[in-house]
Amino acid sequence: MPYEDMVANPTIDAQWWKTAAQSVIRRYCGWHVCPPTDELLTVDSYGGRTLTLPTKHINSVDSISVDGQDILDQCDWSAAGVIRLRNGYWPDRPRAVAVQLNHGYPPEDVPEILELLRNLAKRARTQPGVASQSVNGASVSYLTAGGAPLGLQLLSIEKDMLEPYRLNWGPQ
């Protein structure tokens, strides 16, 4: 469905707006925060025994591959996203390691994320939001953040709420 049709009739596809809101949270935090999802992460490694994945909550690891060879049985991993080789070293090259995992917080553990997701989707779906309106003077002002229409922009208070879930390393 074309974007213009969704904007013109925001009730057409609420799932589209929810997915867009999830993308905003993921982009800001640097990883998929909620709900748990299966994902294949292909990451750079820089030698050494420890590899930090772009996640803050691993539920399970199904495979860890280097050059197509599964080495899961040679590794230990933490829920915080750290994988450690018991022996040897990670290769020193981009996209050297592939990790098939399930990560993300269960919804019941992060109700504030779900509420933010709902609020973002609703705010985007109903844009432009009217902040004030005058009838006889025929003026209207819209909700903005720094002069830009709100849409799917995160407000400062929302960014503060997401800070514990945000990756604090790597490219951001």
Image (tube, rainbow, N blue to C red):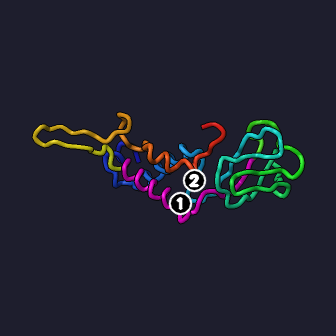
Q: Residue placed at 31% from the left, 46% from the top?
A: 8
Could you tell me residue 116's position as x and y percent? 45, 54
Callout 2 amino acid: Val
Q: Is residue 103 magenta?
A: yes
Could you tell me residue 141's position as x and y percent? 25, 39
Q: Image quadrant for the C terminus?
A: top right
Callout 1 amino acid: Val
Mark 1 crowdedness (10 Å alpha carbons): few <14, some 14-19, many ≥20: few
What mark, if any, has residue 110 been given in the picture?
Answer: 1
What mark, if any, has residue 33 been given in the picture?
Answer: 2
| Left or right: residue 1 compared with residue 38 | left
Mark 2 crowdedness (10 Å alpha carbons): few <14, some 14-19, many ≥20: many
| Left or right: residue 73 compared with residue 82 | right
Q: Which element is circle 2 on?
A: loop
Give the mark count.
2
> Which span of residues is magenta-colored?
98-124
